[in-house]
Image (cartoon, helix red, strand yellow):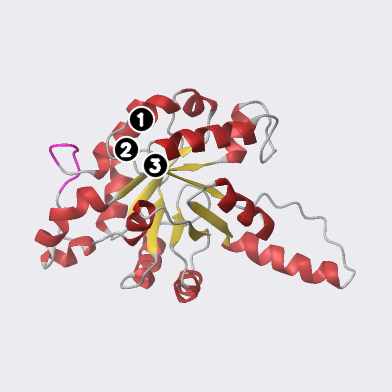
């Protein structure tokens, strides 16, 4: 159960990952083979259900790649099921306050801190590894709030005080929308706010993550101090590669990818 991604945060390393939006575990298998530090399996948007998440988690097991699940919301059932299936952590969307982040932690922690129930499922090797898992799960499991609203930015000082918080992740497009710039990746002032929040998190030893939109953007995010750099989403990376090939052949495509 030792969480390799968590150790990399403690070692102040920059980690690189892939956002998984499609159901085929072959995508995650490729990410593991490439040696990526993490994958995030998205259940908030798109069509993936727990059956498909399970297949992605099977591929990761025994590798150096950590598996995170972006759950549909701050929901007890979704968080505990993802963790019981063997995820190294969850990314929780639309976290706007200290209380909401604390609620997410309570769903992902065993008593007395939380209300996660003890199961006999995959995370504990169907009961065969229960003691080893229970001894360290509360420490090793990552609960990562998405900072994607104006409310979260305004409450960030309180959010960063949640005990056990080790990482946050930014959603620039939704943050832009909450400031009145729907359809923009980083509307006026949003890029600066993200960097301000990242610096506050870093000062408290909390890693910050964000999706990059290109190779150049990945370098920029690394140099800005983000310790979780998403290289892209699976389909976006595929489309980007196809577009670059078509553009090189003189066949222009009217694409405007967010990430």
Q: Mark 1 or 3, which is nearer the eye?
A: 3
Q: What label does residue 191 carry, if any?
A: none
| In the rendered image, the vertical position of residue 87 relative to residue 202, given as above or below | below
Q: Which residues are magenta?
A: 111-117
Residue at x 27%, y 48% (from the top left corner):
80
- 24 vs 176, nearest the viewer: 176
Q: Main secondary structure of the magenta part?
A: loop
Residue 71 on image: x %, y %: 40, 47
Residue at mark 3:
206
Q: What label does residue 100 carry, if any?
A: 1
Q: What label does residue 104 carry, if any?
A: 2
- 169 vs 106, nearest the viewer: 169
Q: Mark 3 or 2, which is nearer the eye?
A: 3
Residue at x 53%, y 52% (from the top left corner):
46
Residue 142 on image: x %, y %: 32, 49
The N terminus - image quarter: bottom left
Left or right: 108, with 150 as reference point? left
């Amino acid at each position: 159960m030792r969480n390799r991604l968590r150790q990399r945060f403690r070692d102040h390393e920059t980690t690189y990952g892939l956002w998984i939006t499609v159901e085929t575990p072959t995508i995650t298998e490729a990410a593991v083979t490439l040696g990526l530090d993490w994958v995030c399996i998205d259940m908030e948007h798109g069509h993936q259900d727990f059956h498909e998440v399970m297949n992605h988690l099977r591929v990761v097991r025994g590798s150096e790649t950590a598996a995170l699940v972006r759950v549909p919301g701050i929901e007890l059932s979704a968080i505990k099921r993802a963790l019981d299936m063997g995820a190294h952590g969850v990314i929780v969307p639309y976290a706007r306050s200290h209380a909401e982040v604390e609620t997410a932690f309570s769903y992902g922690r065993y008593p007395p801190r939380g209300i996660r129930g003890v199961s006999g499922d995959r995370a504990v090797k169907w009961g065969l590894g229960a003691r080893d898992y229970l001894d360290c799960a509360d420490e090793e499991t990552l609960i990562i709030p998405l900072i994607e609203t104006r409310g979260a930015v305004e409450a960030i000082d309180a959010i960063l005080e949640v005990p056990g918080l080790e990482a946050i992740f930014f959603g620039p497009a939704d943050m832009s929308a909450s400031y009145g710039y729907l359809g923009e990746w980083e509307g006026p002032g949003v890029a600066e706010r993200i960097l301000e929040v990242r610096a506050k998190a870093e000062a408290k030893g909390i890693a910050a993550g964000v999706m990059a939109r290109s190779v150049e953007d990945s370098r920029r995010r690394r140099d800005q101090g983000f310790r979780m750099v998403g290289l892209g989403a699976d389909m976006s990376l595929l489309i980007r590669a196809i577009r670059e090939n078509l553009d090189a052949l003189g066949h222009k495509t009217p694409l405007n990818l967010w990430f």
